[in-house]
Amino acid sequence: MTLSKLLELANHSGGTLYLMCLLLLVALTVIIERSVYLSKMQQGGADLIALLNTGVVLHSEATQKALRQHERLPHVSLFTAALIEPASAARETCAGHLEEAVMHEVPTLDRSLWMLDTVITLAPLLGLFGTIIGMFGAFAVLGDVQNGAGEVTGGIAEALIATASGLFIAMIGLVFFNWLNTKVRAIVHQMETLKVMLLNRRFGVAQGVDVRSGLKVV
């Protein structure tokens, strides 16, 4: 299919194909930006967890260097909250402050994903709308006896391109939307893991508590 034919179809669709091109551009922009951002966040979180697993001291130069290197990570706010906590603070107080830091950072992770969700919902509806508009033109030729059935069916086939385009955009968006949500959940899990690790390294494992289940050991 040539470019001139595509432009002709777009002009006959009442502008819906142009709108779907815009939706595709928005979806691709969000997918690329969030994929790069979340991948860097996830890798940086894994590096910080690996650093704590080496048994490094929180106030050591190695820790400070790693925090400067990953200063844009949401995970760093947990280290900041742990480092500024007074030495006399109880475990429960420190845990509450770390949880507060996690809650402040979570909204930044799924930023812009609502746009991708909107595209997934809107694209098929817009495609259906474009097909209905195309159908008007296809059936309008029935009033002229000189037009054959082939012209009518050809017009219907062209009208269905709008629906196919909308479904195509929605399918691409849905795959990446689920993938990006999985990355967001993984990063949140990293932050929760860092919270527990920071608490354990400062206060030790709480006595009489099973850390894996949270149940009191009898």
Image (cartoon, rainbow, N blue to C red):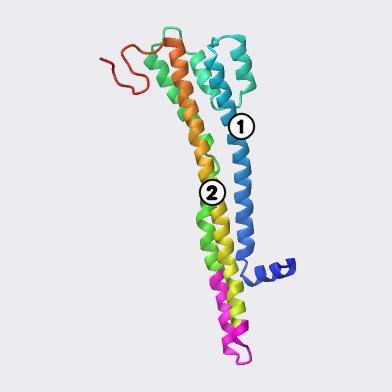
Looking at the image, the residue that sits furthest to the top is 88
Q: Tell me if 66 is positioned left or right of 105 in this view.
A: right
Whether the magenta-drawn stretch holds residue 137 is answered as yes
2 or 1: tag closer to the N-terminus: 1
Above or below 24: residue 133: below
Above or below 120: residue 61: above
Three-letter code, disc 1: Lys
Foreground: 7 or 172? 172
- Give x and y (percent) for residue 214: 33, 22
Q: Quadrant of residue 20?
A: bottom right
Q: Tell me if 170 is positioned left or right of 32 in this view.
A: left
Q: Which residue is mark 1?
A: 40
| Secondary element at tag 1 | helix
Three-letter code, disc 2: Val
Q: Which residues make up the magenta segment?
A: 131-151
Crowd around label 1: few <14 · some 14–19 · many ≥20 (10 Å): some
Q: Quadrant of residue 166?
A: bottom right
Residue depicted at x 52% and y 16%: 53
Q: Which residue is mark 2?
A: 175
Labelled pair 2, 1 in contact (Cβ < 8 Å): no
- Give x and y (percent) for residue 29: 63, 47
Residue depicted at x 63% and y 82%: 151
